[in-house]
Image: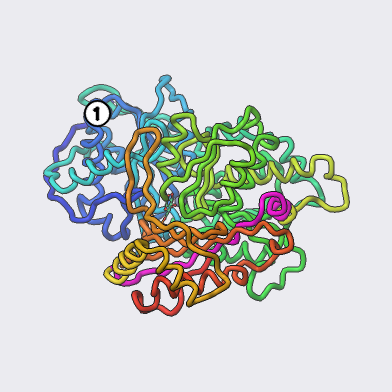
Amino acid sequence: MAIFKVSRVETTPFDGQKPGTSGLRKKVKVFKQPHYLENFVQSTFNALGADKVRGATLVVSGDGRYYSKDAIQIIIKMAAANGVRCIWVGQNGLLSTPAVSAVIRERIGHDGSKASGAFILTASHNPGGPHEDFGIKYNMENGGPAPEGITDSIYSNTTTIKEYLIAEDLLDVDISQIGLTSFGGPEGKFDVDVFDSASDYVKLMKSIFDFQSIKNLLSSPKFSFCYDALHGVAGAYAKRIFVEELGAQENSLLNCVPKEDFGGGHPDPNLTYAKELVDRMGLGKTNTEQDPPEFGAAADGDADRNMVLGKRFFVTPSDSVAIIAANAVQSIPYFSGGLKGVARSMPTSAALDVVAKNLNLKFFEVPTGWKFFGNLMDAGMCSVCGEESFGTGSDHIREKDGIWAVLAWLSIIAYKNKDNLEGDKLVSVEDIVRQHWAKYGRHYYTRYDYENVDAGGAKELMAYLVKLQSSLSEVNNIIKGIRSDVSNVVNADEFEYKDPVDGSISKHQGIRYLFEDGSRLVFRLSGTGSEGATIRLYIEQYEKDQSKIGRDSQDALAPLVEVALKLSKMQEFTGRSAPTVIT
Ligand code: G6P
Ligand code: ZN
């Protein structure tokens, strides 16, 4: 066995290598600059510290976007040089973000070792390709994203870095072939283990859900199913789980071949970007679909987000998590012992709150970002959680999980139809949602996004809204002057969160106006935009009156929308007469 050499390569810092909530995301051409990726990876190793890196087993993989294959070879060579003992790579470099989390938590290596962390190569729902985005983030031994202490230290290292370590003469590993490749290094053996991307994840899903009951549902002539991976990594799991394990038809999978550029599309599962699925489900603008499937779902590039649709019916992510929580114990074996608690992000609608109250469950409202759920889960306080931004998940891992959400929904549909699979008509997705509203009331909900607005204007708007909060009577006067049919604001604040587990405090997490009838207006600056600022306005209204729960949501919310736009002087501050996207 040839012994590889460790080279110390001199380098200088790059500006702007600050990881956001979900790692470092930049255009591919930025990542391709000599030393750019290397600086970030070495800064990560340095932030973890030699005792966490030497002798460790680490995972490296991602959603398969353009530049992943080159990045994987670079990271393998740097890991070898930094004293890592073994690198695990999903075949062809593919692992969904939830699968990485599962692999860290569950997989046992050839030598009995477990992984203590992972480099995930993804820019999530951002487009991919030579002119689009690449990304890298680090996850810890609990399977969740690195906490702020680590990401701050990574960033600070990137500003002072002078050299990185790399085993330049290490031969490239063929990551298309499953198997172990061993190298000899100055400190002993270094292994690269290329393994099947799906099997650990599939095993975990089978331990959570009753696959037989889902299989029965999928084989019912009354049920039809459709899944769109938008050419992201979910395709690698969809075929294995939905077709091979659960017996769905091969032609029920749309765009399920992972592609480096996601087929030129925008791999974000929403009503705008998952166009093919939306059309097929009978929700397209010029709908020509005669008989849409009973159930449809989509995932983003790295398969942590999900969108759930019924026949001509959209399930809002806020309703989705509430409905999963309300039905989990009966429908999903993993939860049969009860839920430890539930949680949602602050801007997500209060549909989950009503379920928690009704079922007497612990409930948490956390700032936007999955890491807050992870803390609660590690402490055994939360089983099911979700966000309005198409993220749903549970404590089986420490990331949101797109395929898990679909299996949760299929389990609920299977449960509701368990004595009805031969009947005339199945209980549909729409029936399930309407029954939920009838029992718990309905939270009308919409989000307005103002993308790429001038950062100064956005800041001023937020400051104005905070200032306005000092006098509620003035706020109510202004509102009455806009619409008399909207209830009174009874509370207004800037959301602040004290983590019940580690006591850390997160401030300035969004501006809230809370109304007497349970309605809410929330204003927040996005933490994921790449140009200028993105203002998000979340509008919500609670309706318990049975005769009023079936309205079109934009109609029902029109008065509150008018109030929100005028109260915030949106047009004055941003120069925009309309949002970029409405969901
Ligand atoms: C990422 C995170 C989510 C979060 C979302 C918010 O997807 O993983 O946990 O909800 O960003 O994005 P925003 O642009 O609203 O800050
Ligand atoms: Zn994602």
- Judge from the rendering whether residue 445 lies leftward or rightward of residue 154; answer left or right: right
Image quadrant of residue 359? top right
Residue at label 1?
83
Q: Check if residue 454 falls in the magenta segment.
A: yes
Residue depicted at x 34% and y 35%: 503
Pick whichever, 580 or 14, lies toward us: 580
Residue 410 vertical placement versus 263 (above, below) = above
Per the image, label 1 sits on a secondary structure element best described as loop
Q: Quadrant of the image for the N terminus?
A: top left
Residue 13 drawn in magenta: no
- Of the pair 448 and 97, the residue shown nearer to us: 448
- Examine the rendered structure and indicate whether residue 395 appears above or below residue 11: above
Q: Which residues are drawn in magenta?
A: 432-455
Residue 454 makes an appearance in the image: yes
The location of residue 336, given as percent across then percent down, is 65, 30
Quarter location, residue 204: top right
* Residue 148 rendering spot, x and y as whole percentages: 30, 42
Q: Which residue is drawn at 27% across and 28% down?
A: 52
Looking at this view, name the residue that lies furthest to the front: 473
Q: Residue at x 26, y 32 (%)?
A: 80
Answer with left or right where residue 61 lies relative to residue 219: left
What amino acid does circle 1 point to?
A: Gly
Q: Where is residue 224 in the image (x, y as percent from the top left)?
A: 74, 53
Residue 111 lies in what quarter of the image?
Answer: top left
Query: How does the figure colour the protein chain or chains?
Result: rainbow
